[in-house]
Amino acid sequence: MLQGTGSDVGKSVLTAGLCRAFANRGLKVLPFKAQNMSNNAAVAEGGGEIGRAQHLQALAARAVPSVHMNPVLLKPESDTGAQIIVQGKPWGRAEADTYQKHKAELFAYVMESFGRLKAEADLVLVEGAGSPAEVNLRATDIANMGFALPADVPVVLVGDINRGGVIAAITGTHQLLPEAERALVCGVIINQFRGDVRLFDGGLKIIEEMTHWPCFGVVPFLRSIKDLPAEDAVVLEKHTQKQKGTLRIAVPLLPRIANFDDLDPLRAEEGVEVVIVPPGQPLPRDAHLIIIPGSKATIADLRFLKAEGWHHDIHAHVRAGGFVLGLCGGYQMLGQHVADPLGVEGTRADEEGLGLLEVSTFLQAQKSVQTVTAEAFGARVEGYEIHTGITKGEAISLTAAGEHVLGHRSKNGRVMGTYIHGLFAKGAFRKAFLGHIGHDSCGSDFDEKVDDALDALADALEKHLDLDALYAASR
């Protein structure tokens, strides 16, 4: 199990790299994360939601994604409340304080799923959540030592030296853990080192002297990981700066943005500039395309968008002849109104939409979670749906699979919306879509770029980590 000295120290990426590295050695490897908190979800085999990180790790392991790889998924809907997904299906909704009362019940599902994977694999690679040093949360923890101890899983502690203070983070974690939990830790990995690793020999000596934990290796700062999908929306807040491009795409940063990895294939396109616009700033007037991204709380984010004045920017953009694309929740916002008569998003509400498509959305308790194929702009579209609600109206159908309408567009073709996530991953559709808005594309599949990045990551881990010792530590 990989646990971290804190959040965002590279656990997800290292787990993915180790999945590929050990799979390359001929082992049947499966990833696992007991509890995940993310609005960046993916669809597992047969339907059901799991965290995007576990989906990527499954692909890295060359395994079929399963709901048992992430049995508990929390999807934040507000600052204190979240939807609870258990083994792929909606289980309930809870505020942070009441959620703790459900932990014992949820842990039974965690252990059931872990047992299934153990029975199928040569090696299960487990990713922790946050840090085991958060001892104030230990009593109800099911994601770090609260899982590792009853499951008897050896732990490797990951520290990110690029963040600074890695010696204090590791030795401080050692001090905070009780003896039984310290004994589970079989060593450490130092991640994201820049420069000559020999300069850190003294640091490694101090860590080992103070903790008696050996180091399995020091992983350098790897630029190849930029091609891997990120799980946490915090990465968007870190990358709001503009990059050069002949085609500018503006994306408002919504508080409950979901499935933002839809943007990754566009970011990777030569000549395309994706500008993430934070609150407090207007949408750029020179944007060719505005994408309203997915949202876990459509009505709340629609109200936020209006409060920021972005709705005025979007309407001005359309009047000037620009293009707009709404993805999932963003698609719902483009219509005449969004109604939530059952309080699916927390409270009953009805909000006027942006009025750019002749459609309306009614949120429903039942969620649509499935992979889909369709056709648009003369190209095949492949992706997946994760949404509540039905959208109907007089606008022209944009994408449809049989009788199942998955999107609409305006008569002039400049305003478009769809429920399909992951639609830009395949090069043929991305090329057709970008051609529609006046930009050429090489049409390469983004999935291949991700797979190449996983191979490069695995090669680096083979070089810089003692994988034999890591495998020997597993039991």
Image: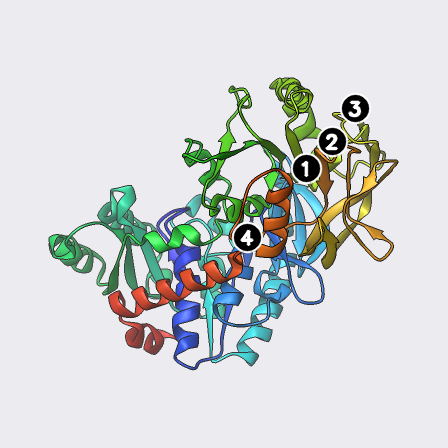
Q: Is residue 39 left or right of residue 137?
A: right
Front residue of 144 and 423: 423
Q: Which mark is residue 36?
A: 4
Element assignment for label 3: strand
**Residue shown at 14%/54% (left/top)?**
196
3D distance between C-alphas at marks 2 and 4: 30 Å
- Tag 1: amino acid: Gly
Q: State which tag comes first along the sequence, 3 or 2.
A: 2
**Residue 84 in view in this figure:** yes
Tell me residue 348's x, y (percent): 81, 31
Look at the numbered discs 1 and 4 and tell me whether their residues touch, using CB distance below 8 Å: no
Label 2 near label 1: C-beta < 8 Å? yes
User: Residue 310: x, y in percent?
Assistant: 62, 21
Q: Nearer the viewer, residue 372 or 49?
A: 372
Mark linked to residue 334: 2
* Residue situated in front as seen by the camera: 68 or 276: 276
Tell me the distance, in whole angstroms, between the alpha carbons under discs 1 and 3.
Answer: 16 Å
Q: From this viewpoint, is residue 104 visible?
A: no
Q: Which residue is mark 1?
A: 326
Residue that mark 3 sits on: 352
Residue 448 in the image: above or below residue 91: below
Q: Residues within 10 Å of mark 4 (few under 14, many from 20)?
A: many
Element marked by disc 2: loop
Near mark 3 (Cα within 10 A), the count class, few <14, some 14-19 or many ≥20, is some
Q: Amino acid at mark 4?
A: Asn
